[in-house]
Image (spheres, rainbow, N blue to C red):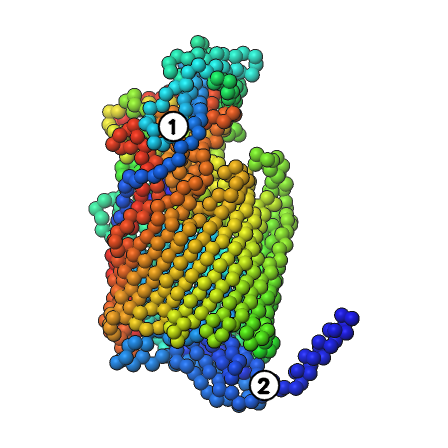
Amino acid sequence: MKFQVYSVLIILAGLLVSCEKVIDVDVKDAEKKYVIEAVVTDQADGHYVKISRTKNISENNSFAGISHALVTVSDGEGSSVLFEEETDGVYKPAAFAGISGKTYTLTVNIEGEVFTAVSSMPAKVLMDSIYITEDFLFGEMRKAANIVYQDPPGVRNYYRYIQSVNGVKYNRIFLSNDEFTDGNRNTNKLRTPSEDETLQIASGDTITIQALCIDKANNDYWFSFLTAGATGGSSTASPANPVTNIQGGALGYFSAHTVQVLEVVAP
Amino acid sequence: MKKILLTGLAACFIIIAFTQERFTISGTIKSKKTGETLIGATIRAGTAGTASNEYGFYSLTLPRGEYLLEASAIGLELYSRQINLDRDIVINLLLEEEAKSMENITITGTAKNRSLSSPQMGVEKVTIKDVRNIPVLLGERDILKTIQLLPGIKSAGDGNSGFFVRGGSADQNLILLDEANVYNASHLLGFFSTFNSDAIKDITVYKGGMPAQYGGRLSSVLDIKMNDGNNQDFSVSGGIGLISAKLNVEGPIQKDKASFLVTGRRTYADMFLKLSNDTILKNSRLYFYDLNAKVNYTLGEKDRLYLSGYFGQDVLNANNRFGINWGNATGTIRWNHIYNSKLFSNTSLILSNYNYKISIASEGTDFDIFSQINDWNLKHEFQWYLNNRNNIRIGLNTIYHTLRPGEVRPSSDKSTINIRLLQRRYSWENSLYATNTWKASDRINITYGLRLTAFSILGEGDYFTLDANRNVVDTLRYGKGEFVKTYINPEPRLAMSYRLGATSSVKGAYTRNVQNLHLLSNSTTSNPTDKWVASTNIIKPEISDMVSVGYYRDMWDNNYELTTEVYYKTMQNQIDYKDGADIFINTDAVETQLLFGRGRAYGWELQLKKKAGKLTGWLSYTLSKTEKQIEGINNNEWYNARQDRTHDVAVVASYELSKKWSISANWVFNTGNAVSFPTGKYLVDGQMAFYYTERNGYRMPDYHRLDIGANWILKQRKRLSSELSFSLYNAYGRQNAYTISFRESKTDPEKTEAVQLALFRFIPSVSYNFKF
């Protein structure tokens, strides 16, 4: 919102000259932390646990995986699945599919340090359709994807969308929930303010949307990821790490969610 | 024993009273030219002296005898007259404009004594002349920007009208316009302030030691009083600047008895948008306007009525897809009554309102978000000029607050948004105060007083109990008008002055302030959507205690003034936000997002001011420290508050080159605000994320800036005067950091870079002002 207000202001006023420059900031080094990204879905594939570590700001941007961890996911009903390391720091199960309504527990043991997290896979809400519109967004006309669905009344639902254009994933978190739209036939517009022109939607592009139904803990994670400063922006006065559901002092999240894939070609 | 003592004391008083017959001179002091009452004018008779109150009333009680009565005020001629005091007399004083001979233009300021003997400290008076001379962004004269050049008052940064006083946050300033609370004093997201300086008569800032009649905020009081309107002649003045135009009309309704004033200002930059070929720009709006209006009526010798109002609105709309409107409205009805030569009363009924509305239109999810804070406020005050040694004020103040934290409504038939209304919050704030300014001896003056505040939270509404993790564990529902909780807080106020000689004095003060309305703002800049909340069963009243000591000296025939003060302040029940807090629109239980703790601030302020001559201005310096300790932040250790800055310097100068030309400049320097930077990075979902380990562990780069300006008087006649003002904001184009953000380097994706965004560089402006 703030961003939008400012972009509008700066465009309209035309007088307010702003300028950007890269500066040197001497940032202290911090103790390294483990980062765990864990996903289980209602599909036969798409499950993974990625383990890595934080780096100092001055270091390069190649993040090595953490190997030799013991990773399991249990469903609370006595069944437990072992995730085995497939590539460097990426762990996957042999055969697994999550079920809506079940609460899963992740356990990661890295050389004796144990991290746990709990996530409930929500009921799946099916998306009806997807279409492309052209709108005035962030100061110019842009194409954007719109997703239509019927929200189930009486329950709080949290949605997350992952958008790819011609198979290239957008690095952007799209979140939605029914706090103000409970029980309605809703349309979610995926606004894409990107400075990178290659990420614009053009006529003929194939747009793929993964629609996820996530639990509240993961909604809170991504909401705070976007607003609390993890993205490096500085509009918040008190930046903090996203609110994680992982116990034991690691960064990241564990999400048990449903997945539906939709596709459309932009007119 | 005690009884005997009291009787003895009473007897002494009676004896004194009978030995010397005393009479009172009282009246109202006004400008002869405009009929405006004069605030804080000095009235002297013999060795006794007093100052006129905020309505121009004065009262002096003296033994029978012959006196030379003298009255003076800044910019006006000294009035003097011989009087024979043998009964109570009423003398209404009219002061003439200072004769400014055309040949001699060196009289540009009056070397008038400031009141060294007044116990009041931590107070700053800003004249409209100061405001006029200071070069500002886009030529918009700005009261709030002017006071930020004073020691102890810090700017919240470029593009931000907020200010920090002695370590307080921006919401801890009580901003009053004709006694009405102004909740958001900024226009255009903080680039300009809401006050149109053309309509303003008096600006007083209390940084500490505020008298007991003020209360409700921890750090400061900015008391702004509007002109009453010329009751002698009609006058029209106005100006056209780069972004706005303004007009001021005032005049008598009935000469000497009643007058009116109307002042308006509107920005017109958006008018050019309509000329654009681009439909998006054509359909967008961005402007603000202000309207001040006032009428006053003298009902007789003893009564005077005032009705004043302010209305301001900002409108921002982007192609009808996104819009936000916000504004303040205030209204004040006041009735002055003079009971007798020693007893003056004022009764005010005040309405304050602030609201914003956000409109979003997007593919069937069209909706509005509305929020409002509304106050009905009644004040009744007596000023009792008991005798020459005691000047008493007693008053009561009752305010009914209604807060509407957030209301979401669909804005079209097709919209799939449901109505969602957060509960309204009601509260009733009652205060009683009494204060006496006591002239203990020729050298010692003491003001002591007490303000007692009872803040009652009223139903209807839900109030919550939280567990240690800030989750709601219990909800208590209260019915309409039911008392949820009442917080009673005494606020003692004490101030003393000791005159060292004719030209210097020392002062000391202790002040406690209590604040029951809190602004939640988790953003680095001020935002129209920042949320006001009242104290609840969980949010406790904020309390501050401050001790300050100062030394004051007038030098070189009163041409220079030296002021230095030190202060130490503690603050209780300070509010901060938990990690990932969402305060914009959430549940009714906003407390789940908050953390509480305490704060402390201390500092040294120095100001050297040159008041007279061709060159006038001041130099101010502040050395200070502000820290917070909040449970759940930085391992519960003390850390720098965001507004903590070590050094603050301001140099303000204005020089009269000739009869027609004057130039001015101001230069500011300050240490950067405390800020949180990430200390690590990692990948999440294939994108770069930053890792934070501590709050406010870093600093923004030092800020400095030079602004220059010039005034060119085109005409100065009795019928018409006009001038052109030029200014250059940020004259040497310093790129001051507005924000610093971190991202993957554009040139080398393997690296991370810090990017600084700077706003204004070399902003020139010209404006034309006239008066006839």
- Is there any visible trace of residue B243 in the rendered image? no
Depth check, front residue: B400 or B667: B667
Q: Furthest-top residue in view? A: A94
Which residue is denoted by mark 2 in the rendering? B63
| Rendering coords of residue B480 (x, y %) | 62, 48
- Is there any visible trace of residue A77 in the rendered image? yes
Depth check, front residue: A259 or B595: B595
Image: B286 above or below A224 = below
Chain that bears disc 1: A
Q: Residue at x 30, y 72 (%)?
A: B614
Q: Residue at x 41, y 81 (%)?
A: B78
Distance, label 1 to label 2, CA atoms, is 82 Å
From the image, which quarter does the C terminus of chain B lie in? Answer: bottom left
Q: Is residue B123 left or right of residue B399?
A: left
| Rendering coords of residue B27 (x, y %) | 51, 80
Q: Secondary structure at mark 1?
A: loop
| Rendering coords of residue B503 (x, y %) | 46, 73
Q: Residue at x 57, y 36 (%)?
A: B470
Amino acid at pointer 1: Lys
- Residues at discs 1 and 2 in contact (Cβ within 8 Å): no
Which residue is denoted by mark 1 in the rendering? A55
Q: Is residue A58 left or right of residue B510?
A: left
Amino acid at pointer 2: Pro
For the residues carrying marks 1 and 2, which lies nearer the camera in this image?
1
Depth check, front residue: B276 or B83: B83
Depth check, front residue: B653 or A10: B653
